[in-house]
Amino acid sequence: MSRVAVVTGANKGIGLAIVKGLCKQFNGTVYLTARDVSRGQEAVKELNEQGCQPRFHQLDVSSLDSIQRFKQHLEQEHQGLDVLVNNAGVMYGRSNPTPLVEQVEVTMGINFFGLLNLTKALTPLLRPHARIVNVSSGMGDLSHVTPELRQTFQSKQLTEQELVQMMEQFVSDVKSGVHEEKGWKMETLAYRVSKMGATALSMVLQRQFDATGADVVVNALCPGWVRTDMGGPSAGRSVDKGAETPIYLALLPPNVSSPRGEFLRDKKILSF
């Protein structure tokens, strides 16, 4: 039975570089997924010309229907999944005029809730020794929040339900205009909080899998400041450099003792 890897948000940037690397190093079928079908198919064509043969499937992580369709495809076609790289993400720049409420709803809907919904939907398909890789960001570090919030994020007792409630409360506080007094006061607010959530979720999910005794490994990482549409032209890293740690985490060997449920940059574990 052929092994299967999936990369979300993969039509450009780091996602595309991860697909390219996995096509060369992962022994199995690699899916390049993207929200936009024509852009996704263009990206596949580009990789075909470089000798890589990924498969394409439409996937919009902010749509439960799209997630469901993709899940059914994987079930029927492959009956399982070995690697999931949650790379799809969005960030509004500092000077973006979009109202904060909308920025928060869209960003959280993709970077946190989309990641969560896709991962939960595909969890029943995970095969032994499956690997989940969440592309987070150093911008989600906890130096920007109150000590109380930091303590909650870092707690080894934090549950999925509590984290989800915390993220929903954040969205609701922004809508009510009380987020600053609740401790959510920082620039590029939506993106930072979504990535705090993504990193914390990785740790929560690892504890869930560990409790079942399954060798499913979940890690989060910061790819660094990478020259992409999101990172901009003056960033110091190439997309291939940004893709190195996600590829490393996707290919961790069976029963690896570390890293598990960690946050990494340049293949090194950092404190969250």
Image (cartoon, rainbow, N blue to C red):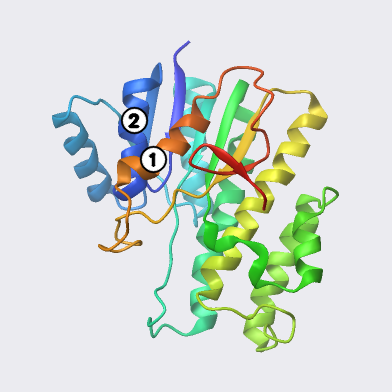
Where disc 1 sits, the SS reads: helix
**Image-quadrant location for residue 22:** top left
Q: Total label count?
A: 2
- Identify the residue shown where x is 64% and y is 30%: 217
Q: Is residue 171 above or below residue 20?
A: below
Residue type at mark 1: give it. Answer: Ala
Tag shown at residue 243: 1
Tag shown at residue 21: 2
Is 36 on the left-hand or right-hand side of 26?
Answer: left
Where disc 2 sits, the SS reads: helix
- Identify the residue shown where x is 40% and y is 18%: 28
Residue 232 rendering spot, x and y as whole percentages: 29, 64
Residue 178 rendering spot, x and y as whole percentages: 70, 87
How crowded is the residue under tag 2: few (<14 C-alpha within 10 Å), some, or many (20+)? some
Is 263 on the left-hand or right-hand side of 9?
Answer: right
Residue type at mark 2: give it. Answer: Gly
Question: Whole-Å distance between the Cαs marked 2 and 1?
Answer: 8 Å
Mark 2 in CB contact with mark 1 (< 8 angstroms): yes
271 or 108, nearer to the observer: 271
**Image-quadrant location for residue 77:** top left
The residue sitting at the right extreme is: 157
165 or 25, nearer to the observer: 25
Kindly tell me whether residue 58 is visible in this rendering. Answer: no
Q: Is residue 218 above or below residue 165?
A: above
Residue 142 rendering spot, x and y as whole percentages: 66, 64
- Identify the residue shown where x is 67% and y is 87%: 176
The residue sitting at the top extreme is: 1
The residue sitting at the left extreme is: 49
